[in-house]
Image (spheres, rainbow, N blue to C red):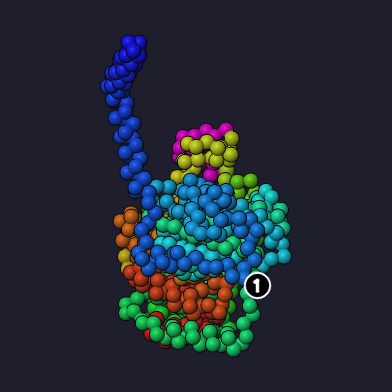
């Protein structure tokens, strides 16, 4: 009995001592524990901010209504996506994107965390191997949340050591719908793809255009069947419905409506500039941007640029166009293509410029004789003088195009090296590789290219706004103000912030639906608002770039309505030709009445 009591007492003593020791240890570790707790609390709070966007009930119901595959021939690997583990195995996030989440068997959510991840795209690889050699292409059901957070979408097909690439456009916003990517559409390639018979991965990308979180959804990946052939009666009925829908759309007073015209003579088929401008005026358009000048050719009497020989036969085309514009009350903004010598420059002309070190050189050392080097002072002076000459001819404005480098592989001529080294006090030992390998040199090279292009915009704008304040200065630019500066030296958001441009026309051409067009337009509007620019945004609508002519009416009217939804004052169509002649009378019945 005593032994049992002693043992019990000893055990109780040990327990008490253990507790005292624990308390003492806790006391000495309180600061550490407090720090760990704070970190955990912060992580929890940040986690709360990472909740996926809240959907209103109607949108949530639409999101939950994932379509059944129906008669689709699903890719065999995709049929295995039936649980979270299988979804994570089949769908791998890339470029810092968030992990996919299973919505239902055969359907995944792709979260786009644009508020935290500042990469240029949200991107996922889908491990769905397949033989596409004898197939029409890829089909899948797609959900796009807030389309205004994207500037575009792409699908890549990995084959061996390379990829096939195709752009695509959502046809609906916040609705499941079917996307079909034909093999014929996948014209772009990266690396050396083995062939369509050996596709191992499908990559889906949404290119970032905003900073708000949203989501994409993908379901039912399958081989696509060729579209059914429509009968003449079906085609006629669809066209009639499109025309009736267009006629129901309201016009808008005071809207700026322009058309780019690549043909230096106006409409083809023996029509004159008078015929061309009258057609625009009769159908509610009030501005034309005629392409009458390239870096190597003028289609008017010029003392700065070489005059095209055809002018001796058909006369000064600027005078003819201006006369018609004044007659019908249509603005004339002359479209002048910068740096690019164009199709009408002679071989002798290009050879002489190359011999003088004035044309561009690629990264691999080969000559690009059709493009002038932007860093060459004689080229800059020539371009500025050509714009000043046009502004003095009584035009309403001058319009800069090709105001950029062709791509990241230009220009690496010896003059560029000399001027770059002098500007930054450098002595490069490994040209041109060093501008890509050394981070500091790479950053300076990026700045050098941007500065060269901006110098022309600034030079033209400063002189014209000072000496001819009634003449507007505008530019056609690429679509993405975030990536354009690094890729092609075109920092157009900065040009707008600095007030160099009166209006800007992003070439928002390659979109297959007004929904995708909406995304890029709203992204551009945010970009200009973000820098406090007062420049007018007038999006370019790519009539001549749409692959399906049967949808011209729906596309054109839909994109006009998008411009109005964005609160912008106008738009510009590309290009004034046969498709425009067919479309204009339809627009006159409604949107441009």
Check the image and report above or below for 456 versus 175.
above
One can see residue 67 in this view: yes
As rendered, which of 429 and 326 lies closer to the eye?
A: 429
Residue bearing mark 1: 226
As rendered, which of 278 and 576 lies closer to the eye?
A: 576
Residue 297 x, y percent position in the rendering: 55, 65
Q: What residue lies at 66% left-to-right and 67% top-to-bottom?
A: 136
Mark 1 burial class by Cα count in 10 Å: few <14, some 14-19, many 20+? few
As rendered, which of 542 and 398 lies closer to the eye?
A: 542
Residue 174 as seen in the image, left or right of residue 76: left
One can see residue 510 in this view: no
Instruction: Choose top left, top right, bottom left or bottom right for residue 154.
Output: bottom right
Q: What residue lies at 49% left-to-right and 80% top-to-bottom?
A: 553
Magenta-span inclusion, residue 420? yes
Q: What residue lies at 31% left-to-right and 17% top-to-bottom?
A: 12
Magenta-colored span: 415-429
Residue 357 as seen in the image, left or right of residue 324: right
Residue 66 x, y percent position in the rendering: 49, 65
Secondary structure state at the residue bearing disc 1? loop
Classified by dominant secondary structure, the portion drawn in magenta counts as: helix
Magenta-span inclusion, residue 201? no
Check the image and report above or below for 120 versus 587.
above
Q: What residue lies at 30% left-to-right and 23% top-to-bottom?
A: 26
Residue 44 x, y percent position in the rendering: 34, 42
Residue 253 x, y percent position in the rendering: 32, 79
Q: Residue furthest front?
A: 1
């Amino acid at each position: 009995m005593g032994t049992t009591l002693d043992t019990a007492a000893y055990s109780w003593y040990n327990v008490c001592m253990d507790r005292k020791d624990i308390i003492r240890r806790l006391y000495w570790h309180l600061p550490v524990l407090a720090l760990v707790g704070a970190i955990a609390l912060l992580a929890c709070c940040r986690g709360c901010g990472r909740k996926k966007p809240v959907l209103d009930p109607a949108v949530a119901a639409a999101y939950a209504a994932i379509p059944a595959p129906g008669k689709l021939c699903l890719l065999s690997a995709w049929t295995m996506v039936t649980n979270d583990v299988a979804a994570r195995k089949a769908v791998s996030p890339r470029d810092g994107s968030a992990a996919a989440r299973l919505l239902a068997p055969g359907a995944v959510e792709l979260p786009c965390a644009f508020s935290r991840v500042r990469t240029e795209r949200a991107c996922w690889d889908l491990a769905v191997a397949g033989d596409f050699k004898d197939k029409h292409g890829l089909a899948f059901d797609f959900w796009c949340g807030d389309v205004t957070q994207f500037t575009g979408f792409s699908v890549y097909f990995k084959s061996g050591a390379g990829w096939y690439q195709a752009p695509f456009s959502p046809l609906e916003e916040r609705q499941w719908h079917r996307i079909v990517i034909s093999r014929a559409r996948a014209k772009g390639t990266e690396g050396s793809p083995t062939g369509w018979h050996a596709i191992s991965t499908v990559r889906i990308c949404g290119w970032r255009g905003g900073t708000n979180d949203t989501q994409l959804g993908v379901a039912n990946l399958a081989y696509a069947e060729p579209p059914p052939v429509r009968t003449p009666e079906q085609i006629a009925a669809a066209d009639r419905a499109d025309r009736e829908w267009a006629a129901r759309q309201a016009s808008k007073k005071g809207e700026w409506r322009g058309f780019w015209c690549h043909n230096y003579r106006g409409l083809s088929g023996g029509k004159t500039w008078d015929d061309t401008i009258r057609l625009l005026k009769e159908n509610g358009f009030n501005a034309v941007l005629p392409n009458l000048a390239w870096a190597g050719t003028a289609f008017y009497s010029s003392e700065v640029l070489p005059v095209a020989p055809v002018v001796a036969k058909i006369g000064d085309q600027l005078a003819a166009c201006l006369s018609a514009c004044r007659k019908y009350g249509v603005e004339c903004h002359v479209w002048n293509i910068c740096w690019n010598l164009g199709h009408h420059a002679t071989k002798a002309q290009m050879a002489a410029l190359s011999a003088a070190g004035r044309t561009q050189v690629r990264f691999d050392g080969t000559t690009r004789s059709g493009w002038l080097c932007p860093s060459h002072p004689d080229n800059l002076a020539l371009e500025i003088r050509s714009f000043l000459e046009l502004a003095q001819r009584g035009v309403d404005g001058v319009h800069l195009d090709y105001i950029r480098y062709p791509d990241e592989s230009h220009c690496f001529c010896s003059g560029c090296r000399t001027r770059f080294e002098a500007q930054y006090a450098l002595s490069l030992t490994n040209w041109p590789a060093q501008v890509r390998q050394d981070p500091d040199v790479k950053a300076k090279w990026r700045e050098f290219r941007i500065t060269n292009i901006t110098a022309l915009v600034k030079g033209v704008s400063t002189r014209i706004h000072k000496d001819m304040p009634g003449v507007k200065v505008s530019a056609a630019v690429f679509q993405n103000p975030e990536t354009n500066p690094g890729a092609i030296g075109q920092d157009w958001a900065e040009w707008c912030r600095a007030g160099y441009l009166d209006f800007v026309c992003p070439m928002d051409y390659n979109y297959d639906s007004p929904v995708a067009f909406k995304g890029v337009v709203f992204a551009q509007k945010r970009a200009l608002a973000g820098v406090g620019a007062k420049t007018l945004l007038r999006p370019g609508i790519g009539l001549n770039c749409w692959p399906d002519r049967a949808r011209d009416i729906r596309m054109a009217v839909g994109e006009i309505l998008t411009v109005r939804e964005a609160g912008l004052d106008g738009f510009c169509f590309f290009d004034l030709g046969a498709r425009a002649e067919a479309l204009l009378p339809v627009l006159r019945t409604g949107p441009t009445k």
